[in-house]
């Protein structure tokens, strides 16, 4: 989160493990440019796609990246 702050951005995460995203979490991202960072495993990738699909309904833009 400190890296995000240094880039004049905001970082957040959802509670619990992969697969626990709730659609209402996306409300706070309305009109924002969002980057979803994937965990580099199958569960993390599935979760990332789920989150991106929910966020895409409300956000100005959605980008998905996976760090090595």
Image (spheres, rainbow, N blue to C red):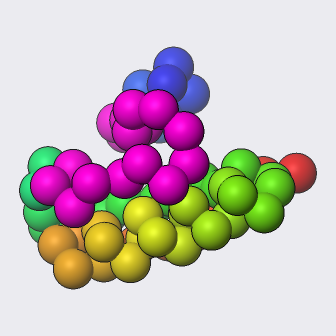
Drawn side of residue 3 relative to residue 29, left or right: right
Q: How would you classify the magenta stretch by its main secondary structure?
A: loop
46 versus 12 height, above or below: below
From this viewpoint, is residue 60 visible?
no
Residue at point 12% right, 63% down?
Answer: 30
From this viewpoint, is residue 49 visible?
yes
User: Residue 58 is drawn in which quadrant?
Assistant: bottom left
Q: Residue furthest right?
A: 68
Residue 9 falls inside the magenta stretch: yes
Residue at point 39% right, 32% down?
Answer: 15
Drawn side of residue 50 relative to residue 42, left or right: left
56 versus 68 height, above or below: below
Q: Give 7 or 48, whichever is nearer the viewer.
A: 48
Q: How many marks?
A: 0
Residue at point 49% right, 25% down?
Answer: 1
Q: Magenta stretch?
A: 8-25
- Residue 27 location (% of width, % of height): 11, 56
Q: Give 58 or 21, whichever is nearer the viewer.
A: 21
Q: Residue furthest top?
A: 2
- Residue 12 location (% of width, % of height): 38, 35
- Residue 56 location (% of width, % of height): 30, 77
- Residue 55 location (% of width, % of height): 30, 68
User: Residue 9 is drawn in which quadrant?
Assistant: top left
Residue at point 47% right, 32% down?
Answer: 16
């Amino acid at each position: 989160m400190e890296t995000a702050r240094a880039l004049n951005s905001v970082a957040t995460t959802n509670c619990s493990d992969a697969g626990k995203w709730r659609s209402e979490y996306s409300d706070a991202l309305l009109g924002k440019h969002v980057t979803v960072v994937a965990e580099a495993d199958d569960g993390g990738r599935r979760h990332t796609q789920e989150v991106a699909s929910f966020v895409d309904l409300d956000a100005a833009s959605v980008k998905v990246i996976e760090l090595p």
